[in-house]
Amino acid sequence: MKIGPVRAHRRICPNPPLKAAAIAVPWTARARGHNLALMKHIAVLTSGGDAPGMNAAIRAVTRSALDEGMTVSGVLQGWQGLVDGQFRQLSARDVGGIIQVGGTFLGSARSAEFPEESGRSKALRNLAQRGIDGVVVIGGNGSQAGAYMLSQLGVHVVGIASTIDNDLFGTDITIGCDTAINVTLEAIDRLRTTGSSHNRAFLVETMGRDCGYLAIMAGLAGGAEVISIPEFEVSAGEIAQRLRAAFERGKTHAIVVIAEGVKENAAKILAYFDADKQRVGFELRATTLGHVVRGAPPSAFDRLLATRLGVNAVKALSNGETGVLVGYQKNEVTRTPLADIVGRTKPIDTELVELARILAK
Ligand code: F6P
């Protein structure tokens, strides 16, 4: 049976609107003749959804900054901690024993106050009072929009790309994404095993409210029969059709992977199947992974990526660079002006979607 084309719902992933301050600052302070020796005290914060490898990045930032003779302060609870003045000086020992731990020991919080002028003023005052001249921001799109705002106010800021969603411009891969793919994949593999025993289809819902990278990569690696993501959604009717085709081809199990942000979500798909049970062949069960994929210990890849990006971010600051995102492109650590990446979301490679369709035989 011919498998129909993927129904495309191209969606632009929403980013927090950038209300940048009016003061324009060139992205390299070196160009302004900045005195590099002034970078004596830096702060590091994690913001937005936590991602496995954030701790490894904090460790790398702290230890490489200490190596360069800088003082390092950790900001607790992300942007909100910057506004509230929650700082903690970090020694090499403080960041010991965390490289293998998921999450962020500094904490992370969304702040409604920081984007407001009053919040930003408090943040600037807190930095000035402590003599902090550089800030490293570890996080995804929203966090880097905040980093850009801060850099626009004249603070030296360098971002590090970290989100399980891997939807940041200026990097091919973000810290945390590899681990989240692997956790999703492990679930898929286990469900396939039990699915085979019972002639069942399993639906696995993984994270990704706006972006389907995680779902598509885990689905491809796990040999899923159907993958539905916000950018290219597959309707319940079409899922049923593809599973029926798989059943007719003699499959003893089938896997459907969906990202949490699809309109036709697990509940709707299950309801459809309930009504259409006899014709589909398989019965369908659903497993929602949710935050399980975010809380895992980081993979070797994420630890190494975090380590390289963390060290490079400190190098950027000590070189007098500001307003840049440290990412990883074409097998190299790169720095991209935040001005070029904020307000944009990296789209899904359509070839991956096609690949998934071709391979689901
Ligand atoms: O951005 C990372 C992410 O885990 C998304 O995949 C998910 O949609 C969202 O965060 C969940 O956010 P929260 O933890 O606030 O529910």
Image: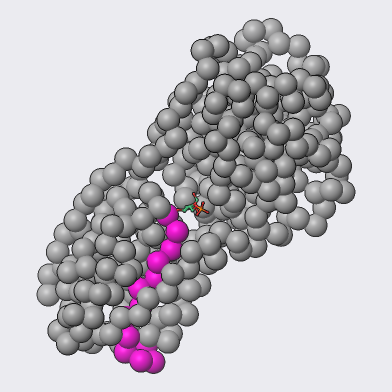
Counting from the top left corner in percent of width and height, residue 67 is at: 84, 35
Q: Give the image quarter of residue 322.
A: top right
Highlighted range, magenta: 196-208
**Residue at the location (60% across, 23% down)?**
118
**Residue at the location (71% across, 59% down)?**
100
Q: Residue furthest top?
A: 33
**Residue at the location (55% across, 36% down)?**
112
Vertical position of residue 197 compared to residue 325: above or below: below
- The colour scheme used here is one colour
Counting from the top left corner in percent of width and height, residue 218 is at: 43, 63
User: Camera-side residue: 233 or 3?
Assistant: 233
The image quadrant where one finds the N terminus is bottom left
User: Camera-side residue: 10 or 312?
Assistant: 10
Residue 170 visible? The answer is yes
Q: Is residue 37 magenta?
A: no
Q: Residue furthest bottom?
A: 197
